[in-house]
């Protein structure tokens, strides 16, 4: 599953899952474009110190101009785009609560970043994937989309929309040999999860683990293998799928 020579964009690469994906992809030989509204210097420094290739770019997925600028800079640096990993999302940045108490502003922000942001990144990057003769788009959904998430209706709804977008793009882009898949993890041990659950973190993680066939919480290293597989040519006939990485909570 070598990624030698492939250029991979990872959005939301400043910390957490995006950082873990970026480092794992670089280890497989990818040229990594770590993009985030947050600072990506730690991600890029670590990759380059380990002998990998990475650049960091500022990205606000809510703005089409920012997405296009990211794509243009990636192409300028590495010549093409082969893989796009749409990981950026509002999660730790939002407040959970009853559906009828959520603010309209938060609802709109979540939909803009978590759905529109993916659509805009795809618009910016797909022309390069077409020119390269194909490639892979990996959209990060969530267990919440399949299982449901009380007191997080905005987040769960946005991640369900990610699956619909993934399936539709897979049908539309197949003729270009661009495969589009989604990965749906359960709650991962990251800063975002800490922030989302706040003081209820430990209890929430215990409940999540108890509902899994594998009774422990998901770590970033449990996800990177799936990402590498979908980014590599090993998955060249896999498209339109949602792969659950949830310890056996939802069995499709």
Image: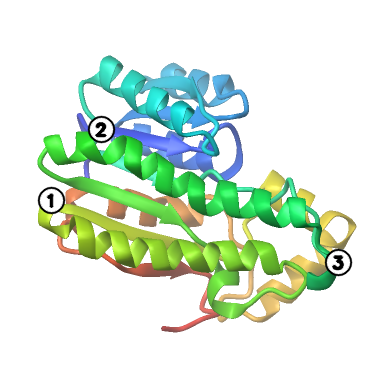
First reached walking from the N terminus: tag 2 or tag 1: 2
Q: How is the image coloured?
A: rainbow
Q: Give the vertical position of 186 relative to 148 (above or below).
A: above
Q: Which residue is mark 1?
A: 176
- What residue is shown with label 2? 81
Question: What SS does tag 3 mark?
Answer: helix
Where residue 136 sits in the image (x, y, percent)? 26, 48
Displayed quadrant of residue 111: bottom right
Query: In the image, residue 125 lies at what x, y percent?
Result: 30, 37
Rendered residue at 57%/62% (across/down):
158
Residue found at x 72% / y 48% = 92
Left/right of residue 221 with respect to residue 164 in the rendered view = right
Separation of disc 2 and disc 1 at Cα?
14 Å
Disc 2 and disc 3 in contact, CB within 8 angstroms: no
Judge from the rendering whether residue 210 lies leftward or rightward of residue 26; answer left or right: right
Q: Quadrant of residue 204?
A: bottom right
Mark in the foreground, 1 or 3:
3
- Could you say where residue 14 lies in the image, as x and y percent from the top left? 58, 31
Disc 1 packing (10 Å; few <14; some 14–19; many ≥20): some
Relative to 160, residue 79 above or below? above
Residue receiving disc 3? 101
Find the distance from the CA under tag 2 to the CA under tag 3: 42 Å
Q: Is residue 130 visible?
A: yes
- Looking at the image, tell me whether mark 1 or mark 3 is earlier in sequence order: 3
Between 88 and 190, the one nearer to me in the picture: 88
The residue at the far front in this view is 104
Residue 42: x %, y % from top left: 58, 22
Disc 1 secondary structure class: helix
- Give the label, 2 or 3, closer to the camera: 3
Closer mark to the observer between disc 2 and disc 1: 1
């Amino acid at each position: 599953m070598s990624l030698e020579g492939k250029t991979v964009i990872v959005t939301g690469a400043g910390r957490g899952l995006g950082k873990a994906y970026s480092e794992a992809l670089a280890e497989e030989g990818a040229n990594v474009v770590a993009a985030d509204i947050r600072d990506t210097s730690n991600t890029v420094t670590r990759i380059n110190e380990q002998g990998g290739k990475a650049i960091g770019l500022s990205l606000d997925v809510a703005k089409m101009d920012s997405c296009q600028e990211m794509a243009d800079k990636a192409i300028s640096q590495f010549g093409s785009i082969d893989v796009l990993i749409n990981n950026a999302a509002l999660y730790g940045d939002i407040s959970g609560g009853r559906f009828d108490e959520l603010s309209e502003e938060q609802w709109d922000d979540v939909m803009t970043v978590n759905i529109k942001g993916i659509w805009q990144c795809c618009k910016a990057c797909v022309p390069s994937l077409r020119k390269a003769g194909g490639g892979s788009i990996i959209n990060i959904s969530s267990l919440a989309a399949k299982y449901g998430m009380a007191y997080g209706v905005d987040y769960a709804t946005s991640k369900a929309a990610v699956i619909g977008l993934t399936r539709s793009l897979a049908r539309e882009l197949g003729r270009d040999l661009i495969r589009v898949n989604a990965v749906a993890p359960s709650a991962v041990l990251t800063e975002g999860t800490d922030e989302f659950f706040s003081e209820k973190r430990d209890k929430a993680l215990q409940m999540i683990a108890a509902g899994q066939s594998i009774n422990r919480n998901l770590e970033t290293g449990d996800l990177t293998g799936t990402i590498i597989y979908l980014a590599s040519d090993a998955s060249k006939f896999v498209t339109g799928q949602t792969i659950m990485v949830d310890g056996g909570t939802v069995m499709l």
